[in-house]
Image (cartoon, helix red, strand yellow):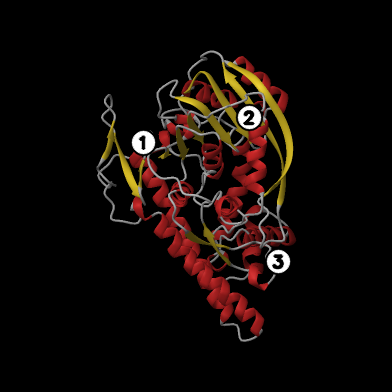
Amino acid sequence: MRNDGLVCGECKTRFPTFRNGGARIPWLFRDPEGAHLEWRARLNGFLHANSAEQARLKDALNDATRSRAATERLTQLLNAREAQRKQIVELLGPLHLGGPRTDSHLDRSGLLHSRLPKQQELFSYYTNIFRDWGWDNGENEKLFECVGRTLQTEPGFKAGRMLTLGAGACRLSYDLHRHYQAELTVALDLNPLLLFLGSRVIQGDAVTLHEVPIAPLRKSSVAVARTCVAPEPISGAAFAFVLADAMASPFKPGSFDTVLTPWLIDVVPQDFTECVRVVNRVLKTGGIWLNTGSLSFSHRNEAWCYSEEEVLKLVGTQGFEVISTERVRIPYLQSPASARGGVEHTFNFSARKTADTESPKRPQYLPRWLSEPQRVIPDLDEFVVAAGTYFLKAHILAAIDGKRTVDEIAALVARHYGLQKIEAKGAVLRLLLELYGSNSLPKANSPPDSAS
């Protein structure tokens, strides 16, 4: 990792900065080395999957029974996957994720304490890049209008110093910055692919990426090279970018006049109460919180899956006065090249901070019995149910030696577990189909495409 950057005056942790085009982007994760290791692993996962996908396509091209049309389609896909690999590696180049290891001497025993949310993978929101900067299908304008309507009670509103938590590829931040005359906009996200792309485009670069729709409309839609470009570039220090965890915001209390949370509050792996406290902490008293997106909470703890009414009540009890709310049905990720697309009922609100509230807890994305090995592992029902399943799966997989057939493995399993042969054969087939269908086998493994 780069050695230049920022240094914490208290703990002396060094936070590097990375040059991306004309921007210098600080890497402000709580454990900068640990976060770098995680993103290296996620990039390597993409590279391995991309290689497997290319191998699968080359095997398909070697099939003598294929038609000419199939050959053209497969060649188009193969070329797109090759180009996509180069594009992603180039975009993430400033991080040196594939370079020589410089951290082998470090004690990584504390890595679990600061690991990133598992659901935030490298390609988790890849499609949003095209929505933001490549499609020009009206979705950005509709989302901007949703946010604007929540400010109708604030005539002459100006964003001042604005922070976007979970900025992604940054289009909504860009639109609000320009329209509401922000003095400073800080776009924060933990995904370097999204933020580096947004940074490059906003600075005026035209960046080409390949979209591979899961349901292409026609032959020309199988793989599409999209040029991502901003309507007008923004240069200088008025628009800044930060790589960090939104739930561990690195800013001083009261630093911002406006905080935007786009498609964020339902995906952070913590109780929404903590999200409200994070926003409250960085807003100055009298500042405005703007929210847009869905309320698709999917927490393990059902008590955290709040309704619209509960969200508003909680906001009102944590130092905010709700100004305006609206539910709006808008198109969502409707690619011009795909037969599939979504519709979302976004939940938009604006709220004014009236008082400080309790400080947010330090984010912890794993239970303490996982991050603290000396703690007792609870006897959860899920473990009991999984035990038998995993033993059976392990037995089946261990019997695969490149010589035995499904029937022979089923006979072994039947004898070991006292099953009927038809039951054992069903178990063997289900496991093999599960692995094959989930792309866990080498020839079926492919990277997330634009439908992820």
Q: Is residue 391 above or below residue 55?
A: above
Secondary-structure class at tag 1:
loop
Q: Which mark is residue 91?
A: none
Alpha carbons under labels 1 and 3: distance apart: 44 Å
Identify the amino acid type marked 1: Asp
Query: What x and y, as percent, mark residue 84?
Result: 49, 64
Q: Which residue is mark 1?
A: 31
**For residue 224, which quarter of the picture?**
bottom right
Which residue corresponds to mark 3? 217
Q: Judge whether 208 appears above or below 39 on screen.
A: below
Residue at 62 percent across and 48 percent down: it is 389
Q: Amino acid at mark 3?
A: Leu
Q: What x and y, as percent, mark residue 378?
A: 54, 29
> Which is more toward the observer, 50 or 21?
21
Numbered disc in front, either 1 or 2 = 1
Quadrant of the rendered image containing residue 30: top left
Q: Earlier in the sequence, mark 3 or mark 2?
A: 3
User: Mark 3 and mark 2: span between their CA atoms?
Assistant: 40 Å
Instruction: Determine which residue is flagged by label 2.
Output: 301
State the residue in front, 207 or 12: 207
Q: Neighbour class for label 1 at 10 Å: few (<14), some, many (≥20)?
A: some
The residue lying at 71 percent from left, 50 percent from top is 342
